[in-house]
Image (cartoon, rainbow, N blue to C red):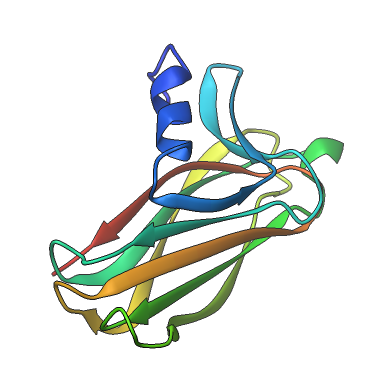
Amino acid sequence: LQNMKDKKPLQAVMKSPRVVNLDGWVVEKESNKMGFVPQKPGASFTVSYENLPTAVDSVTLMVMKSYGEKWDASRISVTVSEKGNAGDNWVPALEEREITGFHESHVSVTYTYYMELKRELPMGSSLKMDIKLIGGSYFKIQGMAFCGS
């Protein structure tokens, strides 16, 4: 995302059918660093994949951490759920994780958070990841990946 000059491709991702329940997150490019940012307290969104084309055993988020009042106390919660078939209920695939967006260092840095799921989700199952701002007023997600072994 760092090298993108135009926000339109990323905005199209946020409007895709895979991003549901979008509430208060927008694409922002500031200081040549693009990402998803919340616009209100409690902002949230869900990334949903029905009928996975491949097995998935981990989720990775690329998150910017920075300093100063704007970033103070910023935190998100991340939950990942799965279901095997259309009629099944969603069950946790990852215990809720909290990720902070602030640090004391006077530089903005992108951190990678690798989160291994409780078990590998087989091809054909469904996955959803819920992200919610739970602290502070600003946060920046610069990327995400769903990976298999």
- Tally the numbered discs: 0
Q: Is residue 18 left or right of residue 52?
A: right
Residue at 14% across, 61% down: 53
Answer yes or no: is residue 68 visible.
no
Answer yes or no: is residue 134 visible.
yes
Decide which of 115, 89 is in the foreground and name it: 89
Q: 1 above or below 104?
A: above
Q: 89 above or below 2?
A: below
Name the spot of residue 77 as percent of width and height, x first: 62, 66
Q: Quadrant of the N terminus?
A: top left
Name the spot of residue 126 as percent of width and height, x first: 30, 72
Q: Quadrant of the C terminus?
A: bottom left
Name the spot of residue 122 as percent of width and height, x first: 16, 78
Decide which of 13, 68 is in the foreground and name it: 13
Decide which of 45, 105 is in the foreground and name it: 45
Q: 58 above or below 61?
A: below
Residue at 38% across, 23% down: 9
Q: 138 above or below 100?
A: above
The residue at the far top in this view is 5
Q: Is residue 129 left or right of residue 85?
A: right
Q: Is residue 79 left or right of residue 100?
A: left
Residue at 70% across, 49% down: 103
Name the spot of residue 73 as percent of width and height, x first: 80, 55
